[in-house]
Amino acid sequence: MRHLDEYRDRALAQALAEQIRRTVTRPWVLMEVCGGQTHSIVRYGIDRLLPEGVALVHGPGCPVCVTPLELIDRAHAIASRPEVIFTSFGDMLRVPGTRGDLLGLKASGADVRIVYSPLDAVKLARAHPERKVVFFAVGFETTAPANAMAVKLAKQQGLTNFSLLVSHVLVPPSIASILQSANNRVQGFLGPGHVCAVVGFREYEALAARYQVPIAITGFEPVDLLHGVLAVVKMLEAGRAEVENVYARVVSRDGNRSARALLSEVFDVVDRQWRGVGHIPKSGYRLSYEYRAFDAERLFEVGDIAAEESKDCISGQILRGLKRPVDCPMFGKGCTPQRPLGATMVSSEGACAAYFQYGRGLEEPPRPGREAGGAR
Amino acid sequence: MCLGIPGEVMSRRTQDGLGFATVRFGSIEREVCLECLPDVKVGDFVLVHVGFAISRLDEEEARRTLAALAELGLDRAELGLDPAPSVAEKEDAA
Amino acid sequence: MSSDAPGLLGAACPVPITETDQVLMGHGSGGKLSAQLVETLLLPAFRNPALAALDDAAQVSVGGTTVAMTTDSFVVTPLFFPGGDIGELAVNGTVNDLAVSGARPLFLSLALILEEGFALAELRRVIESIQRAAAEAGVQVVTGDTKVVNRGKGDKLFINTTGIGQPIPGVSLSSANVRPGDQILVSGTIGDHGVAILSTREGLSFSGGELRSDTAPLATLVEAMLAATPGIHAMRDPTRGGVAATVVEIAARQRLGIEIDEAALPINDAVRGACEMLGLDPLLVANEGKLVAFVPRAECDRALAAMRAHPLGRHAARIGEVVAEHPGRVVMQTLIGGRRFVDLPFAEPLPRIC
Ligand code: SF4
């Protein structure tokens, strides 16, 4: 497949890894911001190709993971109503709240459906005028335009039985929050390529300048990720704190203008609670005044919901790059993807879940080079 | 959550007042909404996320990146790899 | 081996799995939850040597004659999908379990559980398909049963088939034979069935020429392979949970290491495209007409040639090998030369599209 296979080339990846090895003169801590990047890194064993001194820590980059437990419980309450068809992406419907996950609600008669595009939820609303269709809109800036389009379309079509339960978070404020924390140890970032495809990277230039950290806007394929690591390591070694776009085939400085226009029409920026991290100012979206009639939180009164997080979970520190999943005493023991205790175990792109799925942590896969009479 | 896959625009049409395209990934095809990327043409590659095209792949930038990477100046023998066709040659063969 | 030898849970997943008090969909997915059900509930209840081998079919002695026996139930939505239907699946699934155990499939039972209101015309189509598939696989349906459940208590049609086969003389195929050095072969492209089913899901609808279930009877392929290389150690048909489930299970139960070469996995373009689009790993996606063979190194080329000469093995490939290192673990050499463990998900992987 074009524009994919080129970036999974073994020789290129090895050459990049070698170049990183040659560039590094001392230890560095880099954070990949996006959960999709975490998934790729673990899936391809990219961190195992890096020299010992270069540590990749996993960032807050999974919107499903950082959706507060309290909001999932709210979703649960809405989805339990007989008139509601509750829809979202598969990942989100699997996240357990205090009373189980949303897909599990189906067993007790609720109408919960996986959709693959938010427009499908609008279609459902049109096909079932007697029901109320709620779409659980989660995501970063990448997903926000699609969700915005869905509600815009519903408005254009005059639908009154469609609404969004919004849990949208924004990446730059979370990076700022990590950099502001007193015990931060992250020295450079792999910026989230698909987020920047939508919003561009001017905000990242501001972050780099303000906090004096290098950032490489990075894609998701192995060669892209290694390219991003090389770019950041070079800047670190040279003492530069800039933004380098190594994902220029997809990302431009200003991003996608139509998408950004849509976002400012449909959403307002608000403070948000991040699961595992806490309150971050101006770090998310809610529907704008013009679209308030489509806000599920206004339409469905479900009362006050408070949810207790596990005290054993260290996902807050993992999301800030202070700890790794394997540092958690509950990892793989009290906490598994089936029964997650915290944010980072809940979706396949959370750091704990990615480690768990690829069997990391309990022992490490041998580094390449020491191939055990292996398959090649 | 940010899974985005590049595919080729095969055809365009309008439905419910929205622009859509048939986009090809490998040998399968899927309908993709073009509202966030109104100006793409048949033959363009677009990055698709949850059924929406969010970015047009810039062929020139792709070429530039790959060319820069190819100049890392490490040959395959030095990496202990079998000699193999370069990416460009592979593309020609495909 | 005995069933209290290190099991799938003890090794591939050294992690105590939290209990649930309800059956979850994941218990039927071929992932860890399925394994948990087998290990904690079923094996202890029925402990016996034939069961303990945990191969695709059991070998039992009837009046001094050894016969192979297996059973499988089929629940699939939709009943008719690109490349096949539930009837064909119900025949092929069971005869394949016999075939990969080194037995010639001979007889089938057929049990139908019908939902009130299910269209008779559709039932007729399924029965005709069973008839065709049985003829192609060379088996006779010799006994059967029909039950009807109230509307809403079933999903149109469930099928169970039990198969009896005759072990091919001189052949011993069992995962207990697998040894370090064995080469791992797969008979063709992986993931075709699972992706074909996914393509029919509402909202997912994607299309493409090669997007077809691979359901097929494997007995003639198995016989051709055994004729060329009688020393093959084991074969499995990687259905639910895909090739990953097969290799993880064998590594865990036999306390062997397995290395898989990602670049060697045969995957057709349509499956590849769909898996990229949905964020799925083809190694975990179901097959219905493929086998995985464990072959002594010296016989690898001959076995591969025999597979490729058969219409169902044209795209056969060597995908890895059994090693003495990292017992109980499957390690994948990734496309870019990185390394990672292969493990089973708890439940059926959902598209990660979002
Ligand atoms: S393993 Fe579980 S408990 Fe530990 S940090 Fe991760 S999510 Fe929290």
Image (tube, grey):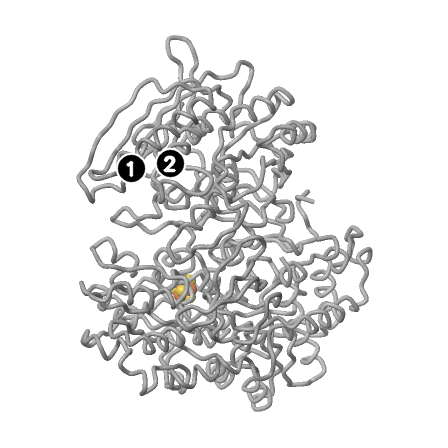
Q: Quadrant of ligand 1?
A: bottom left
Q: In this view, does A33 lie above or below C200?
A: below
The answer to which quarter of the image holds residue A215 is bottom right
Tag 2 and tag 1, C-beta contact below 8 Å? yes
Image location of residue A200, percent across then percent down:
56, 81
Q: Which residue is drawn at 26% across and 75% down?
A: A296
Q: How crowded is mark 2: few (under 14 residues within 10 Å), some or many (20 or more)?
A: many
Q: What residue type is labelled 1?
A: Leu
Image location of residue C340, percent across then percent down:
57, 53
Mark 2 and mark 1 lie on one chain; the one further toward the N terminus is 2
Q: Which residue lies furthest to the top in this view?
A: C63
Q: Find numbered disc 2 in the image and state the secondary structure of the residue it sits on.
A: helix
Q: Which amino acid does label 2 sit on?
A: Ile
Q: Which residue is drawn at 49% across and 34% down?
A: C237
Residue position marked by numbered label 2 in the rendering: C86
- Front residue of A102 and C86: C86
Numbered label attached to residue C157: 1
Res. C294 visible in picture: yes
Q: Residues within 10 Å of mark 1 (few under 14, many from 20)?
A: many
Chain identity of mark 1? C
Q: Which residue is drawn at 28% across and 63% down?
A: A127
